[in-house]
Amino acid sequence: SNVGSTIVAGILFTLMHIPYQMGAAGLDLVTFCRENWSWFILLFGWHLVFTYLYRRFNSILAPTIFHGLMDWSNILFS
């Protein structure tokens, strides 16, 4: 189903970001998960936004551009 595949993909999307974020924070897995539990929820939410954009425009281009703008704004405003 669409809901099931979106949830599974969201879990995988979140898990795939953990190694980079752990390294950037300089934390081990347990400490990272304990101190950043809200980040998991936020990232899963972003997955839902990206999924919506993909389905709305039937193209990977929309979520890719949005993600790029997010990354760029993080650099610009940090």
Image: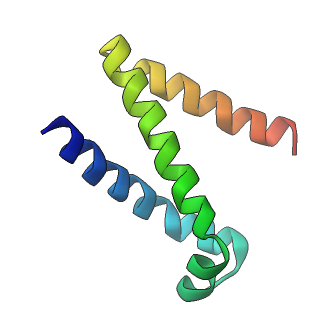
Residue 52, compared with residue 76, is above or below; it is: above
Residue at 87% across / 38% down in the picture?
77
Q: Is residue 1 left or right of residue 44?
A: left
Answer with the quarter of the image where residue 2 lies. top left
Residue 39 in percent (x, y) is at: 61, 60
- Frontmost residue, 11 versus 28: 11
Q: How many marks?
A: 0
Q: Is residue 60 visible?
A: no
Residue sitting at the far left: 1
Residue 67, compared with residue 55, is above or below; it is: below
Residue 45 in percent (x, y) is at: 50, 44
Residue 60 in percent (x, y) is at: 37, 24
Q: Is residue 36 visible?
A: yes
Residue at 31% across / 21% down in the picture?
55
Protein image colouring: rainbow
Answer with the quarter of the image where residue 26 lies. bottom right
Q: Is residue 10 left or right of residue 38?
A: left
Residue 70, compared with residue 19, is above or below; it is: above
Residue 53 in percent (x, y) is at: 42, 22
Task: Locate the N terminus by quadrant.
Answer: top left
Residue at 53% across / 56% down in the picture?
41
Residue sitting at the far top: 57
Residue 24, compared with residue 13, is above or below; it is: below
Q: Is residue 69 left or right of residue 7?
A: right
